[in-house]
Structure formats: structure tokens, C-alpha cells
Amino acid sequence: MTFEWIRLRLRFRAAGSLVLPPGKAANVLRGALGMLLDEAVFAPKSSAGPSGLADAPRPFVLRAAHLDGRAIPPETEFHFDVHLFDTGREFRRQFATAFSGWKRAELLAVEEQPGMVDFAGPPESAARVRVQFLTPTELKSDRQLVTRPDFPILFARLRDRISTLRALYGPGPLDIDFRAAAERAARVRLARCEIAWQHVERRSTRTGQTHPLGGFTGEAEYDGELGEFLPYLRAGQWTGVGRQTVWGKGEICSQVCS
């Protein structure tokens, strides 16, 4: 039982000055995608699905946090990444074709790197794991935003997101006992938590409405029997976790502590 993705690294040369405000580089790209990509890809709909939502999660996420706050001069090269969960060749072609028409920059190259996490691999052992929340992250439990990343909530959001993406764009939902896994996750303790809240907003040019882009960043350490959860954390580095992951929020990385 695996989860697969493809990382596209798109390399560009700026056509003119390109200003990417702090915390909003992905939002600039969001605007470009809205004009360049087919609506069915940009905002897919689903009448039914594992998430129970009318709006299906998009089959990609943007990774552009390294561009936040940069002013890119004309003729300067830069890049950002797109993680694709629909790994079909036609979908990859759509992205490359779309960005070849971006007027603010010239597309120089598209590099592809496949990735995979095996959820049925040999058992692993880990007693303490550190998770870094690299971009603003919002987690919900019982439809409410939470103020700290307790492990049962973090695991549940990772599990649901990975399973839904796999069901919609891969071979099917995760074949696991959701309840039993949740019970084991509940025994993992949040041993250290150092997070800070970031407050960022964007204004829609179409509706004039203001939307929050913030969340918490920082890191947390967890104690317990964590071996079975390592594949979820590894996959989560590519999928993101929480709200608005498609635009770069909820980017995490993890490591086993010695």
C-alpha cells in the first residue's frame, strides 16, 4: 500500500520586476494559475467522496515559501515546486503548457522527480519525533480550529488527507483500521511545543473579500510508540496538512530524535 506523487520544479526567468510580498508568494502564483489552468483542475468538484465535501481537494500543492518577501529583478532566474498527486502524463503536461503562457516570466525548464511512501513496509521504531511546521498551519478538530498540534489531531488530519487524495487520484483509500489507528495515536504525548501564530491575509481581486492565510509555525516533539506513524509524517511533507494546503500552507517536515 503506497502513496505516490511527482514533484515538478518549474524554472523561470522574470520578464520584468516581480514582487512577491512576505507570506504571499504562493498567492501570486495562485492568481496566475487561476488564469492559466483549466477550471476542472484548478477547482475540481465532487458529488461524493471520502472527504464528504462537495469541493474535492485539488490534485496538487504549491511550494513557493522560499520566494516570500523577494523582489526579483528582470532577467533573474527563479523556481518554485508543484507536488502532483494525479501522476498521469496528461496532467503534468497541462501544468507545463499553462505556465509556458505566463506573461510575467519565461518558462525555462520543467524537472520531474517521482516520490513514494510505503505504508506496508517493515515495522519501524521511534520513541520521539520532532515535527517542524514550516509555513502557517491551521488544524481543525470537531470543526473548530485548535491552538496546539496534539498528535491525535495531527495524525487524523494527515490520515484523512492522504487517504482522500489516494482515493480520488490514486488506487483507492488507505486500507487501514481508522478507529484502531486513532486509538493508538491518542497514546502519543505532546512533549514539547514551541509555536507562534502568523497573521497574513489576502484580498480577492474578484470579490473584494479578505481571506486569512495565517496559522501557526514552529515545532513540536512527540513521545510514544511512533513507528507506525512515520509514513504518514513522511507523506505529509509532500501533501501538507490542515487548511489551504494547496497554496503552500501546512508544510511540515519531521525527524526521529535520537
Image (cartoon, grey):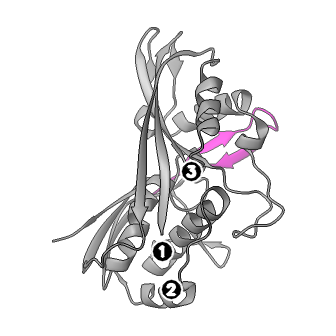
Query: Could you classify mark 3 by the number of other residues whose Cα lies within 10 Å: few (under 14), some (14-19), or many (20 or more)?
Result: many
**Residue designated by label 2:** 182
What is the spatial separation of the Cα atoms under label 1 and label 2, in whole angstroms? 8 Å
Q: In this view, does 157 lie above or below 246?
A: below
Marked residue nearer the N-terminal end (1 or 2): 1
**Residue designated by label 3:** 85
Viewer can see residue 217: no
Nearer to me, 215 or 96: 96
Q: Range of the magenta residues?
A: 197-213
What is the spatial separation of the Cα atoms under label 3 and label 2, in whole angstroms? 25 Å
Q: Which amino acid does label 1 sit on?
A: Phe
- Magenta segment: does it hold 199? yes
The image quadrant where one finds the C terminus is bottom left
Q: What residue type is labelled 2?
A: Ala
Q: Where is residue 223 in the image (x, y as percent from the top left)?
A: 29, 81
Which of the two discs, 3 and 2, sits closer to the camera? Answer: 3
**Residue designated by label 1:** 155
Query: Does residue 94 appear left or right of residue 22 in this picture?
Result: right
Residue at left offset 44%, top offset 84%: 185
Q: Residue furthest left?
A: 258
Q: What residue type is labelled 3?
A: Phe
